[in-house]
Every structure is written in C-alpha cells, then in structure tokens.
Amino acid sequence: MKIKLSILIIIAMMMAVVAGCAPAETDPDDPTTTTTTAADTDTPDDETDVTDETTEPGMEGPSWTWDTSPVTIDWYVHEGWYDKNWDADNVVTDAYITELTGVTVNVTSGGEDERLNAMIASDNLPDVVTLGWYFEQWPLMQTSGLLQPLMPLIDEHAPTFKDILPDSLVGWFTYDDGNLYGIPSFFWAEEHITEDNYLETNDGIHVREDIMNQLDIRREDFNTVEGALDAFRAVRDAELVYDGHRVIPVNLGIEGGVGGGAIRILSNFFGIPPEDSEGNLIERQYDERFLEVLRFMNTIYREDLMSLDNFTMDRSHVEEQWASGAAFVLIDQISDYKAQSQTLFNNDPDARVIGAGPIRLESEDQPVHLNTRAMSGWTVSAIAHDAQDVDRIIRFFEYSYSDEGQVSHAYGVEGVTYEWVDGYIENTDEYNQALDEDSSAAAARYGHNNFWWFFNPPYHQLITRPPERPDSRITYDYDRYFAEYAFYDMAFSDLAPRGGTDEAALASEIDVYWSEQLPRMIMANSEAEMEAIWRDAVDTVYAMGYESVYEVRNERFQMLKDRLDQDFAWPGNQ
C-alpha cells in the first residue's frame, strides 16, 4: 500500500515526537526505563533459584502460563475494515483464550492516517499497536522512542519465547539501531518452510465459472491479452442479468485498480521485470513496458467492459458487488475476497469462482512470476514505550505465536469447533452444522479466525488438509492454482525511504501525484492520449526529484539481496 503523507505532516510529527516523546531520562534501548507493574518490581534478582510458585520467573512451562490473573490490553489495529470486538462473555474462542491466559483485549481500529499520526505526534499510543510494516509510520515509530525494544522484555519476562521465535524473523525485523520492535504476522520464516509447504500469492484473477459455461468461454482463453478481452466482450454483449443485477464484465478492484492490487497483478502477468540485467531495481510504473498494463486497462474502460462506478469503489463496495454476483471477473488481491466468493457460492452453488490465466502479454509460453502473499509479513505488533503490564503483553505475544495460540486464534476450541484427526485440524460436526445453518451467526458465536496478528502460514499449511466443504474448497483451489507461479520475493519488500527523511516526504508527494494521474491514464479517450498522459506524468515525477528516491530504494534493494545472499532477486535474471 502507498501512504500519502505530505512533507509538512512528516516534519510536524517528527518535531512533536522528538519534543514530547523522548525525554532525556528515557532510553528506548534500556529495559530499566520500561514502565512495569507491581509484578515486575517484585521480581527477584536471581531468577534461577526461585521456589515460590506465586512469582513468575523460574516457573515451568511457557511464560504465558505463569500468571493468568485478569488483565486488559488496549490494542489498536491500523486497518479501517477491522471490526473485531473481544467478548469473553458471549464469544466461544474469546472466552477460551481469556480463561487460558487471563488476557482480555480491548480492540480499537481505524484506517485513517490522521488518527495514527495524531497518536504518534501526541505520544498517546495504546499498549499495543498493530500496523502494516510497509506503512511510513512504522520506521518513524521505531526511531522516535515511542516503542519498547522487545528482546529485553523477552529476556526479563518471557524467556521461553526465545525457544520458538525464529532467528530469521528476528534478523529480518531488527531495526537499523539493532533492536527488534515488532512481531510480524504472515511472515515466512525459513526455519518453518519444509518440502511439504507451498508459496502463496495474492496475485490472480477471480472468474465466474457458471458464466464461462453459459457463454462457452474456456479457461485457456485467459492465457493471453486478446483472449481475455474477447471473453470480457462476450459478457458485455450478452447483457446478462444475475439476481437482478446487470453483470459487469470486469471489476478492477479498489478505485478501478488504482487503490488495489490490479496494477501489480497485471504487471506480473505481463512479465514486466522489477529488476534489470545488472541487478538494479526497476520501478515498473515509470518503465516504458508499463504502457502495456495501461493499454489493457484503458481498453477495458473505453470498450465499456467495466463500470464507471468502479473508480469510486472502496473495498467494501468491491466486496458487495462481488458477493452479489454482479461481476464476471475480479482482478484484485485474491485473498481479500475469499469470504465474498464463498457467500456467492453458498447463495447459489452454480456460481462457482475459479482461477484462470495468468493473462500473458504475448504468448502462452511467456514465463510468469508472481509475488508471494506477504512472505515478509503483513503487519507488525509493537508495544508502546509507556505501556502497562508489559510482562503480560509480551507473554501474550508468545502465546499467540506459539502452536497453541496459532490453533486457538485460527480454529477455536478443541472439541467444540475443531478436533485433531491424524495430525490434521478438522471441523467438528457441531461447528459444521452451525456453518450450514447460518455461517454469519456461527462466526459471531464461535469467533475464531479473526485475530491474525501473529499468524504463521507454513505451520497452518502443515496442519490443515485440503478443505472438504465446497465453499472453502473453491478458495483453496484458486490459491493452489496460482501458487505454482509464486517466487521468493523477500528482496522486494521494505524498500521505502525511512520515515522523517527528505526522500520519504518526497516519495509521498510523488505517490500522491501519481495516484491522481493513474485514473486519467486509464480513462483516456484513446490509446495515444493515454500514452501522452503517462509520458507527461513520468517527466513530472523526474522533475520532482524522483532520482533521489530511487537511489534510496535501490540501495535498500541491494542491501536486502546481500542479506539474502542473492545476486539477482527476480527469477527472470537467475
């Protein structure tokens, strides 16, 4: 995602943080400055000789079992769509985890940058903050004394966490100052990847199989640009109506492809390289070959293969249209619309969604390399420098990352929602019956699979069989369909200039400008007009000083390749 912060906001945040958040007596690298509870001050100096079972150090078992007295953690999730409400009185999984650990999570959420920026500038963070590591605020928070280094907390309060925390995770997320400030979700630790795992990708297209069958459209038609366009035209010309909705041939995702994943997906489908033959980073939107992506999207627009409303759709609107069956194809991140594909199928078993393509630019023989689904993680969860109950927080982090926590957060309660069968997780009959009767009510009652902030993908792949439920099977199938094209893309992550730098501010300005120009390109009246807008926009970006931003990104790209012992990161160069 691209964060649109002006240079004035960045400067204001930095001044406020420096002035108000890092008093001289506070050293974020010194665990003795951490705010603690009475339990911390009662900790004996010699933790190895403790015999009193009422004290936490030296007790047997993982640290999260040492103290299960009630405690509440204030937790902010920087995702506007996230609406979990921890309810141990009424929700089965919440009640189980609270009883097991003593922890109640007071969840708040929001997606507005202004809200998080205000928290940062005023030094008013809740106990825990979860946000995407790619947000510009994340490095800013790490450099501003707002967060507690985690390793000292782990050493003091949760030493057993070190037994399960992969070295590759710690190494990858250790900041420039040598401290680890956050635990990621969806990070693929190399220690956890086995020959039985497969890489997942968010790149793909959703296609309605029932409409394909109705109009005699073949799956292989989506292997080329012209074949895909012909399929879209067939749907347009058929003037199909589904459940009272005119079927739109293509939905390009959030903001008509500008705010979602369509541009990245199509760039990968078309084989546009992100790295040149000498190993330097290519920013594809400014490369001549990017015109092929714009040409495809512009054709979709000019030939009435998409709705004009698509350009004003946020994620909820895209979800609504897809779940209602009002579109034939959706080009956006495939994991974001699994629930809607399942809803569509549950309402009409004939309305099955499948994967197709990838759409290649020239021929079906063109190699395709797709980015992984958050191989370097999605979010990070960090502890505020003035958080209360840090001992319990870091232990809850350990619980959530442990196998026990992975299973509870994702699958609920053993014997109630799942059971172990031959080493695999399977739904109980009770839970399957509840899903069949009312899947929404079941989700509200049992309440698992909605606290993903420590999710470990390789582990879950190994403990789950291919689903048998038809609605779950369709999303599993298109995951596996595109998985064969995924490549190990860690070196392409975390390339943004560090927050608070001149380059970060300039990158934000460029992103804002470019996002304003993209709709003009896609909605151009002709191919020639589209190309002229793109060339003018590229010239403007360079005139704004883009080369300084590129130097920083390419430098980080080379550094990450060195860390991964790679000469080339893109498979087309290997």
Image (tube, rainbow, N blue to C red):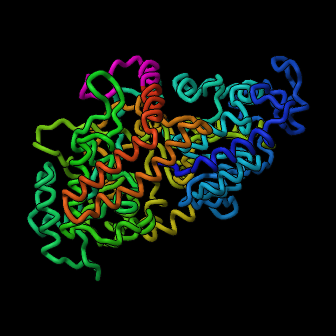
Percent of width and height locating residue 318: 39, 65
Q: How many marks?
A: 0
Q: Look at the picture and state if 510 lies above or below 568.
A: below
Percent of width and height locating residue 483: 29, 40
Percent of width and height locating residue 81: 53, 60
In this picture, which residue range is highlighted in magenta? 558-574
Q: Is residue 381 magenta?
A: no
Q: Residue at x 33, y 61 (%)?
A: 520
Q: Residue at x 58, y 26 (%)?
A: 170
Q: Is residue 566 magenta?
A: yes
Quadrant in which the C terminus is drawn: top left
In the figure, residue 525 lies in which quadrant? bottom left
Q: Is residue 192 visible?
A: no
Q: Residue at x 33, y 46 (%)?
A: 264
Q: Is residue 549 left or right of residue 83?
A: left
Q: Residue at x 35, y 45 (%)?
A: 539
Q: Is residue 93 left or right of residue 41?
A: left
Q: Look at the picture and state if 415 lies above or below 157.
A: below
In the figure, residue 211 lies in which quadrant? bottom left
Q: Is residue 490 visible?
A: yes
In the figure, residue 448 lies in which quadrant? bottom right
Percent of width and height locating residue 492: 40, 33
